[in-house]
Image (cartoon, coloured by chain):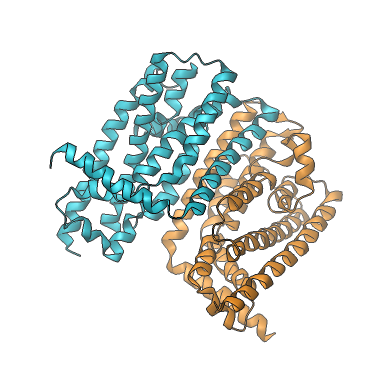
Amino acid sequence: MPILKYVDLYFKLVSAGIRAQFQYRFAFFMRIIGLITAYSGTAITMWVMLYRFQELGSWSFFEMLFLFAIAILSWGFCIILFFHFRSLDTYIINGTFDRFLVRPINPFFHFMAMKFDVASFGQFIFSILIFIWVSIELNIGWTIGKTLFLLASIIGGILIQGGMLVIISALAFWTTKSEQFYWVAMYPARNLTNYPLVIYPKIVQWFTAFVVPFGFVNYFPAAVILEKETPFFPAYIGYFSPLVGLVFFMIAYWIWMLGLSRYKSTGS
Amino acid sequence: MLQFRMYCMFTRKAFLRSAVYRFDVWSRLGSNLIFLLMWGSIWTALYAGREEAGGVSFESMLTYIVISQFLSGINGAGTPLWEIQEKVRTGDIALELMRPFNVPLRYLFADFGSVAFYIITALLPLYIVLFIFMDLMVPTSWLTWVYFIAAAFIGFLIRYCIEMAFGLLSFFLVETGGIVDIFYFAMSLLSGSVIPLWFFPDWLEKIAVYLPFQGIYYIPNAIFIGEISSGEILFSIGIQLFWVIVCFFLLRFVWNRASHKVIVQGG
């Protein structure tokens, strides 16, 4: 099938999903409010933490907010596109995964288009308000170059975190478990990146740069925009975010397809 | 007496069931370690080579955070809230109402079982190793240990009552979204689980002191590192006891209302 048809199909599937979610309007708004309060909670905790200490690893409160807002924004997009991947195991166990295999569409694409979680509006509202507030407080001069770089890094961040969700879901092809891996590995690891990575031991920083590249989601790009130092890494490393995202996502896709071929061969 | 033996059966059953799901225990421990790494690094960076801040030594602060993560491992090992909310949603809770036991008490005793398994097989070995290899403070008087264990246990009960009462709100509200999030945020901040109360802005500290949450983490942690001096320990535990009674009645009240609602609706 040509790519344009895929795009068309994606939007059809997605708009059906959105209409379904708007059926429960009250639940929808409650979720948005819930997300905004949860993120504000983390921000307030940061504020209380820095009330007596002023800075964390030479990052001020507003710089940390900026770092946090980038993470939340790319995670918001990530939830829309990939969050349901974590529960691939339930589809496999219930046998409902087979329906993605019998249709003449790429199963990865089909599974991806199955859900579209609009409730992550909460993430957009929160992070955009923070971006505005922080830009005023820190006097970030938004040139066209900086804006484009921020957008490109956010796309990189979406691909890195999306890729990680895809890899975690692919584990279900081998172990019939994936949701749990999300909660015990990715959820705490993502929490680590809410704070500037410079505070962690060198091995952890190295790990988040070259193994599970969460450092490229927010820390390295934020360091470039805010002109912060990144010890152990060259100052320009943040510019690689989009590229790292692309490569990492391709690896994730490859692992997923590998798992899928294995799934077929077991014939369950 | 017979009643008590019945509840102990729930503890035993939960203990044995945890042994079957050993993978869960190990993975939960892994996640606990990542959060320990995070808060340990944050406090190391906040102190930034300083020996002390606000009259509290770095060693004490690091011990505070390690004990706090240990306690949060204990507090997180019981029945997750969403499981109870799921039972409410599907109506399964009605089946439990027909049985001759008190449902909140039944879950509490079951939690004792899963928590005991988690402590014995995972938390204690890990944290003993941490205390051997890291420069942490260890209370020298056995009395402090007794007070700490008592305070940690009462803290567990406070947390259980509050969290269960909140979980039962799903009987009354279709969607608990925002309220539950505010509650969890308040509990994690005001309990002193990650930032001790003495580093709060004064106005916030005043609020925290008058709320039950401090009994969950702050009081046991502060007793352990000797930040609450021996004269004040009994007073602090008294405050905890006051709150555990209040929270117990809150839970009983919410539960009575909730179970009536089930009877009216016919489950």
Colour given to chain A in the rendered image = cyan
Q: Residue furthest bottom?
A: B2
Give the side of residue B177 with respect to residue A92, left or right.
right
Q: Where's the C terminus of chain B, which quadrant?
A: bottom right
Query: At 50% across and 74% down in the image, what residue appears?
Result: B92
Give the side of residue A131 with respect to residue A77, left or right.
right
Q: Where's the N terminus of chain B, which quadrant?
A: bottom right
Residue B236 visible in the current orientation: yes
Give the side of residue A110 with respect to residue B46, left or right.
left
Q: How many marks?
A: 0
Colour given to chain B in the rendered image = orange
- A229 to A13, vertically: above or below: above
Query: At 59% across and 70% down in the image, what residue appears?
Result: B107
Q: Position of residue B158 (x, y in %)?
A: 70, 59
Query: At 41% across and 21% down in the image, what residue appears?
Result: A233
Residue A40 quadrant: top right
Q: Position of residue B264 (x, y in %)?
A: 61, 77
Residue A229 visible in the current orientation: no
Residue B195 quadrant: top right
Residue A263 quadrant: bottom left
Q: Position of residue B261 (x, y in %)?
A: 62, 73
Query: At 72% across and 35% down in the image, what residue appears?
Result: B199
- B7 to B200, vertically: above or below: below
- B79 to A241, vertically: above or below: below
Q: Position of residue B137 (x, y in %)?
A: 68, 43
* Residue nearest the viewer, comparing A30 with B135: A30
* Residue nearest the viewer, comparing A155 with B32: A155
- A225 to A81, vertically: above or below: above
